[in-house]
């Protein structure tokens, strides 16, 4: 009996040790953040975007962990992103539903739309089913300028949310007071940005009245060119004088023709001529 008791105790101890080792084993699923997401651009990856409060995400976690155990055999990296902790990645990948799974192969992203079981994930990689899915356009890729701007916008919105919580909860400012502070800050920042844009526009495209005068003949000319230009100016002035003289002569002649004749003939009286005869 004592031997049986010792054997049962030893078996329980071994099971407890094995369970503790299993619990202490690190998860094969890698956690990505805003600082490490560029690792997705190299190699093959399967990435899950989730939120701790999402029921569908919670039911997916066991299958995702089992699938990650096959990652080394399939030569694929398994990762996950908590969108509540990484809002920048949520905006960069345009996450509109949870959970969302992406497949990435050497920087080319495809959205996974299949069933969410370990077997389906394994078949998706081993059979290369991802080749039948149209990749995400480069314009909307996570490394594009558009998605980088979207990521910055999401990070700004989360920062504003944290500031609002700090002002209302930690400092004790009323909610309307926090809104007023953000409204004033928005107006002030808009004014500063507007002045900067006006200043840059004035520097790049100055108005005509502020432009420096341009002199077409400001450069020093050769003696022959200067003599030729002087001669051309003199000929032009002479032509203008001749034209002025001709116009003045034509005007005088027209005036003379239009004026009445100064010498008038005396009318001849036929009666007086008869008396004289």
Image: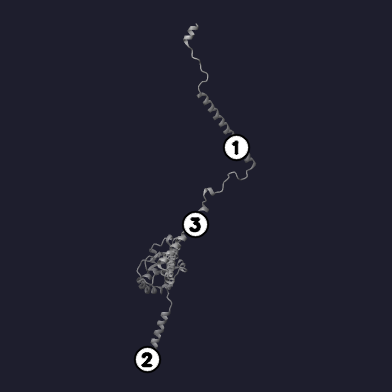
What is the distance, in whole Å, between disc 3 and disc 1 at their CAs? Answer: 49 Å
Q: Does the CB distance between marks 3 and 1 fall below 8 Å?
A: no
Where, quadrant-wise, is the N terminus in this rendering? bottom left
Q: Earlier in the sequence, mark 2 or mark 1?
A: 2
- Mark 3 burial class by Cα count in 10 Å: few <14, some 14-19, many 20+: few
Residue 101's place in the image compared with 201, above or below, is below
On screen, residue 107 versus residue 114, left or right, reads: right
Q: Earlier in the sequence, mark 3 or mark 1?
A: 3
Where residue 200 sits in the image (x, y, percent)?
51, 55
- Mark 1 burial class by Cα count in 10 Å: few <14, some 14-19, many 20+: few
Residue drawn at x 38%, y 89% is 9
Task: Looking at the picture, tell me which residue is in the foreground, 208 or 94.
Answer: 208
Residue 228's place in the image compared with 118, above or below, is above
Where residue 150 sits in the image (x, y, percent)?
43, 62
Residue 127 seen from this side: no
Residue drawn at x 51%, y 53% is 202
Query: What mark, if any, has residue 5 been given in the picture?
Result: 2
Q: Quick one: SS at disc 2?
A: helix
Q: Does the CB distance between marks 3 and 2 fall below 8 Å?
A: no
**What residue sits right under mark 1 in the picture?**
233
Task: Looking at the picture, tell me which residue is in the foreground, 216 or 198.
Answer: 198
The answer to which quarter of the image holds residue 96 is: bottom left
Query: What mark, if any, has residue 195 been given in the picture?
Result: 3
Q: Quick one: SS at disc 3?
A: helix
Q: Nearer the viewer, mark 2 or mark 1?
A: 1
């Amino acid at each position: 009996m004592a031997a049986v008791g010792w054997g049962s105790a030893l078996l329980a101890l071994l099971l407890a040790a094995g369970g503790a080792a299993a619990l202490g084993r690190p998860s094969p699923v890698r956690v990505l953040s805003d600082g490490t997401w560029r690792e997705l651009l190299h190699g093959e990856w399967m990435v899950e975007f989730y939120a701790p409060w999402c029921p569908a995400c919670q039911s997916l976690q066991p299958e995702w962990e089992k699938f990650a155990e096959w990652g080394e055999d399939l030569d694929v990296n398994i990762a996950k992103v908590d969108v509540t902790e990484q809002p920048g990645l949520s905006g960069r990948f345009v996450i509109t539903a949870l959970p969302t799974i992406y497949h990435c192969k050497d920087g080319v992203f495809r959205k996974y739309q299949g069933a969410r079981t370990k077997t389906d994930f394994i078949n998706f990689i081993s059979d290369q089913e991802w080749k039948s899915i149209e990749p995400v356009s480069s314009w909307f890729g996570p490394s594009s300028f558009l998605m980088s701007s979207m990521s910055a916008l999401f990070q700004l919105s989360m920062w504003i949310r944290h500031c609002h919580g700090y002002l209302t909860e930690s400092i004790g400012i009323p909610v309307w007071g926090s809104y007023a502070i953000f409204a004033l800050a928005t107006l002030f920042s808009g004014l500063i940005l507007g002045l900067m844009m006006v200043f840059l526009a004035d520097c790049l495209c100055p108005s005509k009245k502020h432009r420096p005068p341009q002199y077409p003949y400001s450069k020093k000319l050769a003696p022959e060119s200067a003599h030729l230009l002087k001669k051309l100016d003199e000929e032009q002035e002479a032509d203008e004088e001749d034209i002025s003289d001709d116009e003045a002569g034509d005007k005088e002649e027209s005036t003379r023709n239009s004026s009445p004749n100064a010498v008038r003939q005396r009318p001849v009286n036929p009666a007086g001529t008869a008396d004289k005869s």
